[in-house]
Image: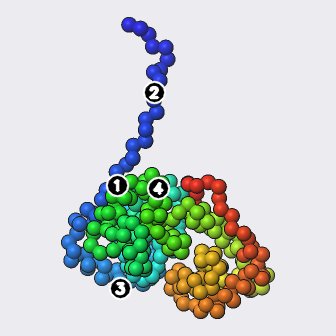
Amino acid sequence: MAELNGPPSLTPAKPVREPVASLADLLAMETPASLQELRDELRERERLRLIREYEAAFFASRRRDAFLLSEVLAERGVPPCFRIERRYKADSLTPAQRFDLVAHDLQWLAATYPEHKGKGGHAEMLTGKGDRWLRVAEYYGSLKSQSGDVWMIVRQLQLDEEQQWECLALRSMKIKRAAAGLKRRQTTLKKALRARHLKKVTDWRGLAPNPVYARRELVWVCGEMTGGSPTKAARLYRMWTGNAITRQLANDDLQWLRLKVPEARQPRREPDDEEGGDV
């Protein structure tokens, strides 16, 4: 018998794509009456509670709960981009979680832009009725969302940049890069506003909260997401906080920041890396 000269060479195995369990099948295990009862119960809950419960359900992989919470949040006008506060790595998500983010984006688009289903291809994914749209999304999602080709769905659906900003998964690489850069710039702006506030409002109990600065920070983020439009920034601010502000107030905040806070005038810088950044 010939002797082996060292260990045999091994050809690296190709990564095996983990199949995503059907969310449509999971929902079909419930009776329509029980799902409707759950929806009705969720609709009675306060907005911030729904957001907290959605985030908890998503990261706990309670897919049915996250789906129903996403549906109700879409009805309440809360876009996917404002539902998760926790920072996480995109590659830390399971295949099921990555698909669920796509499904939750589609729920938002169907509820908020019903006229859009007449544009682009795969319009059946934007009906939001029954489960056919979800099964179509599962077919395309199984091909795209795990391979990093979500942008192909974005292109087929002909989503504009504002719609992509409101989504969390259905974003082109351009918007993903801009969103990652905006998070970093927001951190810098927050520190600058806090330093400015420290100089002005301090009492024996410590730093007093300044709701005006907090609002201006969020209005600035909304302005960056919408190309600097005060009208669109005010709309997005209401979606984010649940509080309505006028176009004039949004414009005043944006102008004040540009005039008083140099960090608000930072040019947009997009990271070089295409994947794996903080989301």
Q: Which mark is residue 10?
A: 2
Inter-mark Cα distance, 3 to 2: 58 Å
Disc 1 from disc 4: Cα separation: 16 Å
**Residue sticking out furthest to the top:** 1
The residue positioned 22% from the left and 65% from the top of the image is 29
Q: Residues within 10 Å of mark 4 (few under 14, many from 20)?
A: some
Which residue corresponds to mark 4? Answer: 149
**Coloration of the structure image:** rainbow
Quadrant in which the N terminus is drawn: top left
Mark 3 vs mark 2: which is more N-terminal? 2
Front label number (1 vs 4): 4
Disc 2 marks which amino acid?
A: Leu
In this orientation, does residue 161 appear? yes
Residue 44: mark in rendering: 3
Q: Residues within 10 Å of mark 1 (few under 14, many from 20)?
A: some
Q: What residue is at 59 percent from the left and 86 percent from the top? A: 231
Q: Which residue is mark 1?
A: 20
Distance between the alpha carbons at the discs numbered 3 and 1:
32 Å
Query: Depth-wise, is mark 2 or mark 4 nearer the camera?
Result: 4
Lower sequence index among marks 1 and 2: 2
